[in-house]
Amino acid sequence: MALSAKEKISTSLMIPQPTLTTDRLLLQALNQQDQTAIHTLHSDPDVQRYITQEPPVDLEASAAFIQKIQEGVQAQRWYYWGLHVKPQTRQLIGTICLWQFTEGNTIAEIGFDLHPVYQGRGYMSEALQSVLRFAEEDLKLKAIRGLVHAENKTCLRLLTKNRFAFVRELPPKEKFSSEQDLPIVLFERLRE
């Protein structure tokens, strides 16, 4: 999403990325051992249905993606976690991130994906609640935004269940070029 004239992207975050845990998940930084799982996740047609990111053409493309993510985390431009089922901490089943922080680090966008085999089991709800807790309690974010394809009903339900409210549909000038023909809606959660 393009930002309004008042909003600028922050280039540095305040807190290094922590490892987070839930009852069933370990949320940790991606590493090159996740290459095959990332490739499988980002190549899955069900995962790709509502996003505009090109699927990786091969394992090398997935390795380059992980490298880019690691560099952004290290430079403190975003937070990006791999979701691993406990106790099998090597099995990556999805990802979740906070990015597009506004200058002053008061607002961020959340994004996530989950392999279809693990959907419908509450894993993403668990991960989302953990990241929201970190965002509000540790980062002190005032708001967290979710940009969603309007037809992605599962994602819309997840956001609504977690106190995100519909704000508006994005006009073309606020979308990435790859999203111009898609109905993208903005949801937002304000810190209580």
Image: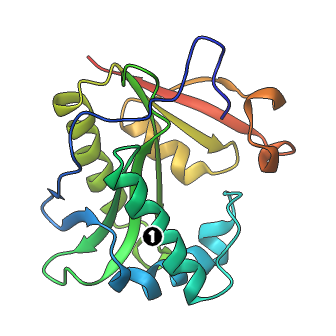
- Amino acid type indicated by mark 1: Gln
- Residue placed at 74% from the left, 42% from the top? 176
Q: Where is residue 155 in the image (x, y as percent from the top left)?
A: 52, 49
- Residue placed at 54% from the left, 53% from the top? 154
Report if residue 45 is visible in the image. yes
Residue position for label 1: 67
Q: In which quarter of the image is residue 110?
A: top left
In the displayed structure, would residue 189 be above or below residue 65?
above
Q: Where is residue 75 in the image (x, y as percent from the top left)?
A: 36, 49
Q: In which quarter of the image is residue 187?
A: top right
- Front in this rendered view, residue 103 or 90: 103
Report if residue 114 is visible in the image. no
Left of 115 or right of it: where is 51? Answer: right
Q: How many marks?
A: 1
- What secondary structure is marked by label 1? helix
In the displayed structure, would residue 132 be above or below residue 107?
below
Q: Where is residue 170 in the image (x, y as percent from the top left)?
A: 73, 28
Q: Position of residue 93 (x, y in %)?
A: 37, 75
In the displayed structure, would residue 167 be above or below residue 180?
above
The quarter of the rendered structure image containing the N terminus is top right
Left of 13 or right of it: where is 36? Answer: right
Left of 63 or right of it: where is 32? Answer: left
